Image (tube, rainbow, N blue to C red):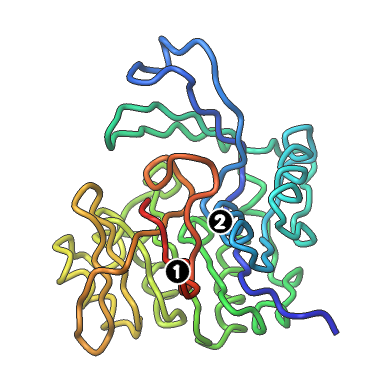
Amino acid sequence: MPEPFEVLTMGRIGVDLYPQQVGVGLDEVESFGKYLGGSASNVAVAAARYGRRTAVITRTGDDPFGTFLHTALRGYGVDDRYVTGVKNLPTPVTFCEIFPPDDFPLYFYRLPKAPDLEIYPEELDTGAIGDAGVFWVTVTGLSEEPSRTATLAALEARARKDITVLDLDYRPMFWPSREEARRWVQQALPHVTVAVGNLDECETAVGEREPLAAAQALHGFGVKLAVVKQGPKGVLASLARGDCSPPRGVWGDGSPQSRGVPGGRPPGPARPGRPWGPA
């Protein structure tokens, strides 16, 4: 019987195109670098770089960019058995502008619909989801059907086993309104043990922007560990018993906001002698 995955993620994947010129808008950029992207995929890559057995549940277009993403995942050591193609939908592309130290506007091209929103409940390997050491899902997966139902079904199959993470990756362009996003986030929160988000994402999830208030509101939904990202001010990690303390370091989802190179920092507990690195 195969060993369970140490980290299994579910959600976005796409091709990120980062400018090779810093401090200028896309209208002035002359060249780009091409990378694997998408928060769930980057978390899987980050964990694989630390030697964890990882996989991602997602979908790509049945096109050359989809082939690139399969190759990239395997190259980083991520199992791609749950990554399937969708005919007639293009693999998403995301452009980024880089304005140091902390301004990274993103431009998503996910029309007419992103393939990673075409995940169906009946396609899920619920055994693998239940057995994984860490299961990580994203709020984007709740934005449209059938991915919404599949994400909630995956969380139900997980049965609040530690460590179950909801990445509060709210992107306003993916939702009809902040209120609609909050509605579905609050249906998912009782199923997870960890929630991770920045101040805007926490406000979307629970209506609170002040870090301590946001953490306490997340605990009110049963979240054991609330991680509130505050940009240059660092990260607040709050345990449900009310103790709040900074983590030994900060990890990210691999996005420009949380990393300097593709792959980000690993989720889950640090190994002895290998703490989380600064993002």
What is the crowding at mark 2: few (fewer than 14 residues within 10 Å), some, or many (at least 20)?
Answer: many
Name the residue that disc number 2 marks. 46
Quadrant where the N terminus sits is bottom right
Q: Where is residue 219 in the image (x, y as percent from the top left)?
A: 28, 81
Tag 1, which secondary structure?
strand
Q: Which residue is drawn at 78% across and 32% down?
A: 64
Q: Where is residue 31 in the image (x, y as percent from the top left)?
A: 54, 15
Q: Which residue is drawn at 54% across and 57% down?
A: 43
What is the crowding at mark 1: few (fewer than 14 residues within 10 Å), some, or many (at least 20)?
Answer: many
Q: Is residue 226 left or right of residue 55?
A: left
Q: Where is residue 218 in the image (x, y as percent from the top left)?
A: 28, 75
Q: Is residue 157 left or right of residue 198?
A: right
**Three-letter code, disc 2:** Ala
**Three-letter code, disc 1:** Leu
How far apart are the alpha carbons under marks 2 and 1?
17 Å
Q: Residue at x 37, y 65 (%)?
A: 196
**Vertical arrangement, residue 115 with respect to residue 24, above or below:** below
Q: Which residue is drawn at 25% across and 49% down?
A: 231
Looking at the image, tell me whether mark 2 or mark 1 is earlier in sequence order. 2
Residue 116's label in the rendered image is none
Residue 166's label in the rendered image is 1
